[in-house]
Amino acid sequence: MHLLQIVWDPSKGIDLGFFTLHFYSLMWIVAFILGFYIMKRIYKNEGQTEESLDSLFIYSVLGIMLGARLGHVIFYQPELISEDFFSIFLPFKFKGGFEFTGFQGLASHGAAIAMIISMYLYNKKILHKSVLWILDRVVIPVSLGAVFVRIGNFINSEIIGEYTNSDYGVVFKQLGESQPRHPAQLYEAFCYVFVFLALYYFYWKTKKGEQRGFLFGLFLLLLWTV
């Protein structure tokens, strides 16, 4: 056992008896709750109504979850389309017996694409502003939400880094490994904190939030940098 080496073999969730609350799902819930309160403050500052905020939350949750799920299925698990179709959209497994599984398998790039589409639809149906207006603002809570999603990936031993080729690192025991890797998920989560702080600062402390497309563009730039 080395001081700078962690053998990572956590519980996947909290057993409530009738189902298991997965920590990964809990991280998504935390992300949505924090995102709602951040946007509530932003909408209050912008003079937007609570009704439009509620609609934003619905569009965001449906868009992100549907996009994340479809992104995972299309890119990583396409066999579900023919083998267990309803498990794509429902938190249950039907093949081989009925079982509550939660929404396992969510792709962040699918969520990102769906978020842009859902914001376009939200703006067209509800907000009636420039779509960049809403994108400039939602990227602030999105960047914070990404922190918790990556923590969830770490808990699930997903999106792992390269081998460190040293005694330092994390051994992902649940993957059957014995050599330490870089905890890439935590590196990304740490970087997303700074992305959030940068966007938050430019919106609240400068006039850049009024410059259409600036925050969204900065978000994309920092995202690619991370």
Image: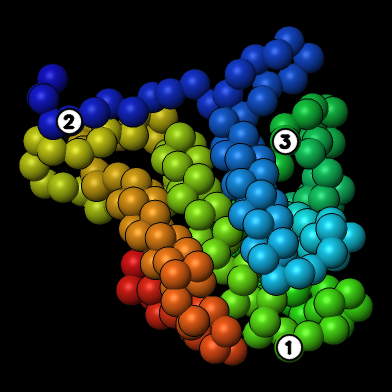
Residue 189, given in percent of the width and then of the height, sits at 39, 51
The amino acid type found where label 3 is placed reads Gly
Label 1 – label 3 distance at C-alpha: 36 Å
Q: Dot 2 lies on which element?
A: strand
Task: Indicate which disc residue 105 carries.
Answer: none
Could you say which is closer to the camera, residue 15 or residue 85?
15
Residue 206 left/right relative to 12: left
| C-beta proximity under 8 Å, tags 1 and 3 | no
The amino acid type found where label 1 is placed reads Ser
Circle 3 is placed at which residue position? 102
Picture residue at 74% right of the left edge, 20% below the top? 19
Picture residue at 20% right of the left edge, 39% below the top? 169
- For mark 1, does the 10 Å Cα neighbourhood hold few (<14), some (14 to 19), or many (20 or more) residues? few
The amino acid type found where label 2 is placed reads Gln
| Residue 139 drawn above or below residue 80 | below
Residue 63, given in percent of the width and then of the height, sits at 76, 63
Could you say which is closer to the camera, residue 101 or residue 78?
101
Q: Is residue 188 visible?
A: no
Could you say which is closer to the camera, residue 117 or residue 57?
57
* Position of the N terminus by quadrant: top left
Q: Quadrant of residue 133?
A: bottom right
Circle 1 is placed at which residue position? 130
Q: Dot 3 lies on which element?
A: loop
Circle 2 is placed at which residue position? 5
